[in-house]
Image (tube, grey):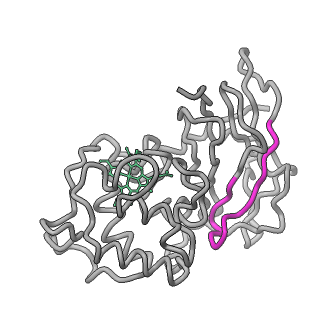
């Protein structure tokens, strides 16, 4: 049985943006308000996800947070951002969710934007920073329940649109593994066999597999979180969707993943010892 490395990065329309990680505050006007200097984006910023995406995440954050090199695996392009934010643990402070629906104070995203997160720099990295009025709109969206964007443009077909850690990433012993999906998952069909995390031996063959706890993040059925049950020893790991009929990953509409008949390697990453 062949295993194909699915090149997730190539699927990201924003991958080309990775090169320009300049931190020059593109998209912000002199007052730290997004969009108003270019006047381009769909009316004023409002407390809904589509508006925040088009006023903040796309013009300002995807300068860095896009493609396989996105910092901390956090891609903020429109195809990936919701799945990787809502209900998903932060990489820097795994005890906090990036967005905790209903609770902006305990949402790591807000802490990073306001500059009081426990780890790393204020966002956008290097400034200029968002003004408090803009951050308050993001807070309001979270307070209101962090609803997803209206499902007008649901892509056809059930597919994985992003995987964290991305191929080639170096991570610590307790990575949050997150799949972003194009459609809502059927939660009743997720079980221990839905995904496999293999330790890769010197020959490239699997040298054992690591038990995972799989769950759909709270309020975010287009994502799947896979948490290793114990810390990972340093080494190379790959995440595999078993071949049908084993795979339990299916969309709410009954479409299955891995219908091509092979086990698919979704990502291969390295666990490095703490520095
Ligand atoms: C110039 C590049 C750059 C820009 C622009 C940028 N970031 Fe970041 N971001 C980083 C880097 C680098 C890190 C990791 C280091 C750190 O946290 O200081 C990071 C980390 C983060 C994290 C932590 C992720 C986690 O899981 O722990 C969040 C949240 C975040 N950024 C949100 C944003 C948002 C929202 C924007 C846009 C308003 C933004 N960033 C713009 C470079 C950038």
In which quadrant of the rendered image does the N terminus lie?
top right
Q: Residue at x 78, y 26 (%)?
A: 206
For this orientation, the residue located farthest to the top is 203
Q: Which residues are magenta?
A: 210-225
Which residue: 30% across, 80% down? 45
Instruction: Judge by depth and name the residue closer to the eye, 7 or 235.
Output: 235
Q: Residue 128, image x and y in percent?
A: 21, 57
Locate residue 182, reporting x and y percent. 59, 63
Quarter holding residue 266: top right
Q: Residue 160's x, y, as percent?
A: 62, 54
Front residue of 74 and 125: 125
In the drawing, does residue 174 fall left or right of residue 24? right
x, y percent for residue 233: 71, 28
In the picture provided, is 135 more to the left or to the right than 109?
left
Of 86 and 81, nearer the camera is: 86
Left-right relation of 271 to 51: right
Where, by quadrant of the figure, is residue 83 drawn?
bottom right
Q: Residue at x 52, y 26 (%)?
A: 275
The residue under the point 53% across, 67% down is 106
247 in relation to 267, above or below:
below
Circle count: 0
In reply to whether residue 222 is colored magenta, the answer given is yes
> Image check: 10 left or right of 180?
left
Q: Name the one closer to the observer, 43 or 99.
A: 99
Instruction: Say whether residue 187 is magenta.
Output: no
């Amino acid at each position: 049985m062949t295993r194909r490395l699915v090149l997730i990065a190539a699927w990201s329309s924003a991958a080309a943006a990775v090169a320009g990680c300049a931190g020059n505050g593109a998209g912000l006007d002199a007052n730290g308000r997004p969009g108003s200097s270019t006047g381009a984006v769909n009316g004023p910023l409002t407390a809904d996800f589509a508006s925040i995406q088009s006023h903040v995440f796309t013009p300002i954050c995807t300068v860095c947070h896009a493609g396989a090199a996105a910092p901390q695996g956090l891609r903020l392009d429109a195809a990936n951002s919701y799945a990787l934010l809502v209900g998903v643990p932060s990489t820097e402070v795994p005890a906090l969710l990036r967005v905790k629906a209903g609770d902006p104070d305990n949402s790591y995203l807000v802490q990073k934007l306001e500059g009081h997160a426990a780890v790393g720099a204020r966002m956008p990295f290097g400034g200029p920073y968002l003004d408090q009025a803009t951050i308050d709109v993001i807070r309001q969206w979270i307070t209101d329940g962090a609803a997803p964007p209206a499902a007008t443009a649901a892509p056809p077909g059930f597919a994985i649109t992003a995987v964290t850690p991305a191929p080639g990433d170096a991570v610590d012993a307790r990575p949050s593994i997150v799949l972003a999906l194009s459609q809502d998952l059927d939660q009743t069909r997720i079980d221990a066999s839905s995904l496999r995390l293999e330790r890769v031996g010197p020959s490239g063959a699997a040298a054992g597999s690591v038990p995972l706890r799989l769950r759909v993040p709270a309020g975010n059925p287009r994502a799947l979180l896979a948490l290793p049950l114990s810390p990972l020893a340093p080494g190379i790991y790959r995440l595999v969707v078993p071949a049908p009929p084993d795979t339990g990953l299916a969309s709410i509409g009954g479409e299955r993943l891995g219908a091509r008949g092979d086990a698919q390697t979704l990502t291969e990453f390295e666990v490095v010892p703490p520095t």
